[in-house]
Image: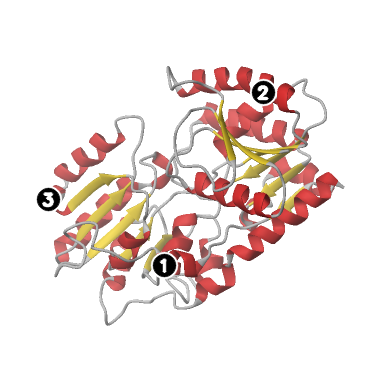
Amino acid sequence: MICIYVHALVATGVVRNARLIAADLAAQGHEVQLVTALPGGEGAPGVAHHALLARAGGSRLLEKLRASIALRRHLRAIKPAILISAGNHGHGTIWCGSRGVAGVARVYRISNDIMRIIPGAPSGGLRRRARGMMARLIAGDAARLVLVSPTLVDTPAFRGATDEGRVRLIPNGIDAAAARARVGGDAPHPWLGGPVPVILAIGRLAPQKNFGTLLVAFAQLRGERPARLILLGESRDRAREQLMAQARALRIADDVALPGTVANVFPWLARADAFVLPSWWEGSANVLLEAMAVNTPCVVSRSAGNAAQLLGDAGSDGGCYGLLVDPADPAAMAQAMARQIDPATRIRPGDRIARFDHAAVSDGWRALVAELLA
């Protein structure tokens, strides 16, 4: 059996990738189980789902500790051959919960930049040291480390695993035809398809996503021309209220909407005039692939993982298939958004997405599992 772990089946790129990996491996004939800390959510077709806890409760740290204890019992009961942690937020649970469990090959999928050494980015000294310690622990523990972007290869904590041949690069991909098939139907928001250009951003309302800088940039853009901004995403804390308070302070609240999370982002992306990804850091952003799949003009932070590779970096001001910006420069972000919502100057991704097809992802995981089961 192969177990694939995420904390909860919520609307994130990590979870979407976990579902795809699970469905692919099941289709290849493997017995696969999605394991989560929390119950509920949409699983993967043909894949069993096991929740370790009956309900959410307490802090995220407490949930992870409780899940680790329950995971150890579950692993000893079902005895999987391979245990995959699909994203960074699950690695601590997997590491703790699998101590003393013999016969299971642990695979850690590094879904994001763990160290986050980016000028201007929020980092937190103690938290950075804790992340460094965890990176070293999982690198030493892993039967395989899976990196989703070439930008992660130089992480110092992974050098030993790289030298020992335990690192595999499996970038994210997308089935573009399937994505475009999900575009149909009515416009999901009254602003979309209207006379005023709409800019769309998608992601957890977390410091990593840099939505505060985006609001400053949007205010500068809004001072020059009509535009609207939609942020799709949620958080467990007060981030939503804080962002709306910032929008009110910038006097742009009437042109900013935060509808929460949605099950299908493609009708939103296809109808937006531009997509913006202002993140301080990423691994390989699924949502950028999704925007490219439906040919939406993109403005993306240069430090957002492999964004430069995806958009075909052509120099300091952008790529061949979209615009790249400094995440700490709201003026540059505003200028790029203005360019991308203007039909006369916008740059669309075109067929660039064909180079990042999901078939390569499926092949990469097939080969990795075959190595571990050999």
Residue occupying the point 47% across, 24% down:
60
CA separation in Å, label 1 and label 3: 32 Å
Q: Amino acid type of disc 2?
A: His
Residue hosting label 2: 74
Residue hosting label 3: 254
Q: Which quadrant does the N terminus fall into?
A: top right
Q: Is residue 171 above or below residue 207?
A: below
Q: Amino acid type of disc 1?
A: Ala
Q: Going from the N terminus, do you reach mark 3 or mark 2 first?
A: 2
**Residue 324, image x, y percentages:** 43, 65
Q: Secondary structure at mark 3?
A: helix
Instruction: Rate crowding at label 1 as few (under 14), some (14 to 19) or many (20 or more) other CA atoms within 10 Å.
Output: few
CA separation in Å, label 2 and label 1: 38 Å
Q: Is residue 358 left or right of residue 193?
A: right
Q: Is residue 177 above or below residue 300?
A: below
Q: Going from the N terminus, do you reach mark 2 or mark 1 first?
A: 2
Say which of marks 3 and 2 sits in front. Answer: 2
Front-most of residues 77 and 139: 77
Q: Is residue 269 left or right of residue 80?
A: left
The answer to which quarter of the image holds residue 140 is top right
Q: Amino acid type of disc 3?
A: Asp
Q: Is residue 142 visible?
A: yes
Front-most of residues 16 and 161: 16
Q: Going from the N terminus, do you reach mark 1 or mark 3 first?
A: 1
Q: Secondary structure at mark 1?
A: helix
**Residue 328, image x, y percentages:** 39, 52
Say which mark, if any, is on residue 154: none
Residue occupying the point 52% across, 45% down:
14
Residue occupying the point 31% across, 52% down:
214
The answer to which quarter of the image holds residue 339 is bottom left
Residue hosting label 1: 181
